[in-house]
Image (cartoon, grey):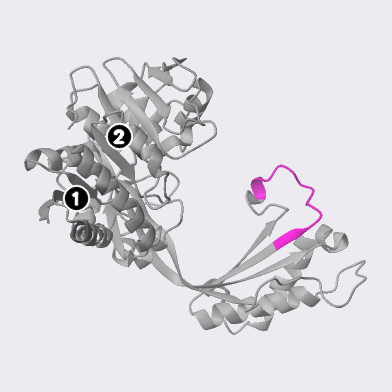
Amino acid sequence: MAVASNEEIRILTPSGMLGYGFPIKHVKMGLALKPHAITIDSGSTDSGPQKLGLGEMTCSRANYVKDMEVLLEAQQEAKIPLLISSAGGDGSNLHVDVFRDIMVEIAKKRGWRFKLAKIYSDVDKALIKKELKAGRIEPLGPVPQLDPREVDAATVVVAQIGAEPFNKALDESEGVDVVISGRAYDPSPTAAMAIRAGFDPALAWHMGKIMECGALCAEPVGRSVMGWLRRDHFEIEPLNPAERCTTASVAAHTLYEKTHPFLLAGPGGTLDLSECKYEQVSDRRVRVSGSKFIPAKPYTVKLEGAKTAGYRAIFIAGARDPIFIRQIDEILARVVDITRDYYKEIPPETYRIIPHLYGKNGVMGELEPVKAPAHELCIIVEVAAATQAIATAICGKIRTSLMHAPYPGRIATAGNLASPFTPLEIPLGQACEFNVYHLMQVDSPTALFPVQYEEIA
């Protein structure tokens, strides 16, 4: 087993997301470099609120089984800690237990033994409402003040884990081999290993920020990456020989998912990157120095919660008539008015009609700077309503009205749209929305995150 010295700690990250897969040969190349830990994230809010709202996972169980078996084999071979964060995507207690069950299955099949630590991150709603009443919760970004009714409406609320709970899990009980955590700040596992070994928190957090996405910091982007953290700098190199890190690619990835070019807030403080230096130390490796960490008082953690919000249905259609495309906004507005009038017995505030025009402004909406639409459009109209039946019915009315809507200059009368799928109206089931996205003050970085230990054999 590799033991971190006072001068260097080496960390292997096989992929930016557990369940997305990675080349096994590159993981083996990383193991040959004798890392002191393997860290991998599996969480994100990018794919929407349904994971928290409905208890779904980002990837299939089969994908998690496949990736975990490779990583457990690496852990057994190298005898180093394996840290997996944000189980299932949302990091709920439910998915921490799912990941635990997968590991038990794999261990039984392969005859492996290891000590498992589970860090849970669901937060008691009564505690949240108590802290809210005490004025210790504030919005994170452009969201409303938290309403106690929204806390109750959330299926579950999780708090983001910083570095401290990971280190508590590794230090409190001797011989922990594997850590599965609930919802964690993405850089936390990597930063925790480095901070635990006595390295500069600023460099630890910055290296964690780069490595959380695997080799997304490389050219071309890839999966597996290795990090070397030393006293006054760290170095990053992808494990695929066909990829390389450059000063531009690593500096660019430092800007990834940030609202400020130099400041990155997280549990316990803010990373200040305004004086960072990026150096090309080989054709494929970059050295980073100059990071600073500004501790925050009081210590805050991010709360995430989602609730169910009715049902959705969509239709998908294509259009290529340039006369129709030029007038699509006006035609859609008329169709929506016709639909609302047709269903005037349904209160309009109880449903939403949301068009998505790919080829015009489907990605950026009103922020789209290029106003001329393409020669063809993909039209997706989404309807959200109180029941699936209402959502599907309104969706069908919009589709048929748009299909046959008259417009100035119309030549063909067979129909305005081409529908690639049946059923023509596609029911999507329950819809969810984030309703808790706030910061809460805590007296201890570990108090919200209980740890359980288990011998897996």
Whether 38 is drawn above or below 272: the answer is: below
User: Gap in Å between the C-alphas at discs 1 and 2?
Assistant: 26 Å
Q: Is residue 374 magenta?
A: yes
Q: Is residue 275 above or below residue 88?
A: above
- Which residue carries the number 1 mark? 119
Return the residue nearer the eye: 46 or 397: 46
**Can residue 259 be seen by looking at this rendering?**
no
User: Of the residues tagged 1 and 2, which is closer to the observer?
Assistant: 2
Disc 2 is placed on an element classified as helix
The residue under label 1 is which amino acid type?
Ile
The spot of residue 382 in percent (x, y) is 60, 68
Q: Tell me the residue at 19%/41% (across/down).
A: 166
- The three-letter amino acid code for the residue at tag 2 is Leu
Q: Position of residue 43 (x, y in %)?
A: 36, 50
Answer with mark 1 or mark 2, whichever residue precedes in sequence: 2
Q: In the image, is 174 to the left or to the right of 34? A: left
Task: Mark yes or no: residue 307 visible.
Answer: yes
Q: Which residues are magenta?
A: 366-378
Q: Residues within 10 Å of mark 1 (few under 14, many from 20)?
A: many
Q: Looking at the image, is 37 positioned above or below residue 450? A: above
Q: Quadrant of the C terminus?
A: bottom left
Quadrant where the N terminus lies?
top left
- Give the SS element for disc 1: strand
Which residue is under mark 2? 31
- Give residue 275's quadrant in the image: top left
Relative placement, left or right, of 310 versus 79 is: right
Q: Which mark is residue 340?
A: none
